[in-house]
Image (tube, grey):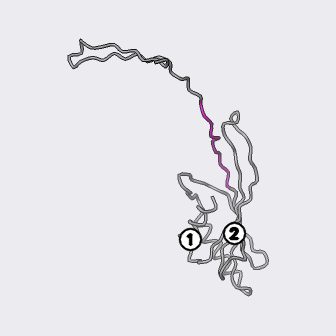
């Protein structure tokens, strides 16, 4: 999920420093930082599905002394990327979002809710006997063959 969000940010903004890792690894400003926090993970449909919710917090930081006007402009740009929907891989998401500025850091937050399947194997019965009727092109004559697991 994080890699898909970062791809969307790279294609939708001109910010060069985008990270999903530790902010101290960033090489400069302005900076977009993507943080994912799992909120809910529950079983559904007799354990065959998993309902998940993830809080996405995209933080936007500029130099230490900046105006809120520039920060809100970036938050509006982020809203344009993620609203009314966005795609990651073969999934489409529609998320409610909120924006805030705290200590000169802009926060674009949204909750992604989705359902995943749980991988499971369906045991198939092993065939023990196979019968085949071969017919020639005339559709009338042919051979009958039997194959079994015993040989």
Q: Distance between the residues labelled 1 and 2?
A: 15 Å
Crowdedness of circle 2 by 10 Å Cα count: few (<14), some, many (20+)?
Answer: few
Q: Residue at x 74, y 59 (%)?
A: 37
| Crowd rating for badge 1 (residues with CA inside 10 Å; few <14, some 14–19, many 20+) | some
Q: On the image, which quarter does residue 139 sit in? A: top left
Q: In this view, does 136 lie above or below 60?
A: above
- Rendering coords of residue 85 (x, y %): 58, 58
Q: Start and end of the magenta stretch?
A: 112-122
Residue 4 position by quadrant: bottom right
What residue is pinned by disc 2?
21
Compared with 120, 61 (above or below) is: below
Above or below, comparing residue 106 to residue 151 in the picture: below
Q: Residue furthest front?
A: 151
Farthest residue in the left direction? 138
Q: Residue 10 carries which label?
A: 1
Q: Earlier in the sequence, mark 1 or mark 2?
A: 1
């Amino acid at each position: 999920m994080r890699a898909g969000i970062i791809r969307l940010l790279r294609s939708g903004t001109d910010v060069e420093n985008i990270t999903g890792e530790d902010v101290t690894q960033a090489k400069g400003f302005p900076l977009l930082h993507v943080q994912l926090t799992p909120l809910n993970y529950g079983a559904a449909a007799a354990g065959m599905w998993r309902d998940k919710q993830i809080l996405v917090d995209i933080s936007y930081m500029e130099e230490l002394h900046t105006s809120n006007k520039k920060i809100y402009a970036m938050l509006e740009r982020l809203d344009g990327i993620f609203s009314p929907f966005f795609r990651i891989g073969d999934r489409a998401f529609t998320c409610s979002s909120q924006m805030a500025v705290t200590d000169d850091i802009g926060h674009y937050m949204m909750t992604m809710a989705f359902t995943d399947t749980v991988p499971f194997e369906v045991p198939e019965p092993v065939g023990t006997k196979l019968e085949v009727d071969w017919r020639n092109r005339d559709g009338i004559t042919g051979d009958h063959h039997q194959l079994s697991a015993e040989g």
